[in-house]
Amino acid sequence: MATLSDATKKLIEAVGRVEHYEWTQVQTNYRYNNYGRFIFETFDYEKLLEKIEETIRSKGLPEDFRQYTINRWYNYITSLVICDFFLSHPRVRRCPERRNKQVDFFVDGKPFDLKVTFIPKYWSFKRALSALRDPRKLIIYCYEGMGADRAHFGAKIFFVMVDINNIGSHPWWMKREFDALERVVKLYLDRTRETAFFRNFRVRSKGSYVTVKAADAIFLIKKDKGFYYSFFRWKDNIPRAIMGRI
């Protein structure tokens, strides 16, 4: 792994302590989200657990608030680390508005939001494999299925975790395979300098259509004991897959 800031190293250590990840309810429990807002200001795992226990006691919350909030914190922290991998590349610069919920960084001057996600649970093996070579349907699906907490139609890069031996699972542990993730980010940014991205396509929203100006997809793929990648160079909205083993 390349040289990282001390802050990023601490995040990697903290998120490595998460032992369990399971959703027992939908991920848009607004009551839990409101009481768990401290996740965005907590970067130590032990302090996180302390705040969770105090909130359960003081607010009289059910026990499942604990795992729900650990999951949200885990997703937030892993995304911060992956964003740092992007920001270490010369093509990328940080969004100057720290609280901008629609832009994480700029690639070649173009704003993007990073979304780390998975293959949809009900997708077939064949459909998932097809997305590794042509992600257009998956990108559209991701926009149309966005949760209300990050529902916007600005430009996004979807970083998709795929366990090829268990399609339909949500391999949460892959979000902290940081050596592999960092290498994929660097390969992507080095080898897509001429990309035009997936541009000006339409997605359904509340019974009408919205035009998305730009999007892209990157895949980290686990197969047997190895990691692989797939990403794309776009021209005229046609993707050319770039694939390999890490």
Image: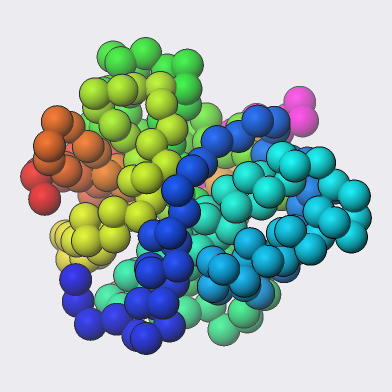
Q: Horizontally, is 83 left or right of 103 in the view?
A: left
Query: What residue is drawn where x is 62% and y is 71%?
Result: 47
Tell me which colouring the rendered structure shows.
rainbow
x and y percentages locating residue 154 in the rendered image = 59, 54
x and y percentages locating residue 53 in the rendered image = 74, 59
* Depth order, front residue of 84/55: 55
Q: Which residues are magenta?
A: 200-208
Which residue extends farthest right?
A: 59
Residue 235 on the magenta span: no
Query: What residue is drawn where x is 57% and y is 84%?
Result: 96
Query: What residue is drawn where x is 57% and y is 48%?
Result: 71
Residue 163, visible in the rendered structure: yes
Q: Horizontally, is 25 left or right of 57 in the view?
A: left
Residue 110, visible in the rendered structure: no
Residue 160 sits above or below residue 115 on the image? above
Q: Quadrant of residue 103?
A: bottom right
* Depth order, front residue of 33/53: 53
x and y percentages locating residue 110 in the rendered image = 45, 68
Query: What residue is drawn where x is 51% and y is 41%?
Result: 21
Q: Quadrant of residue 5?
A: bottom left
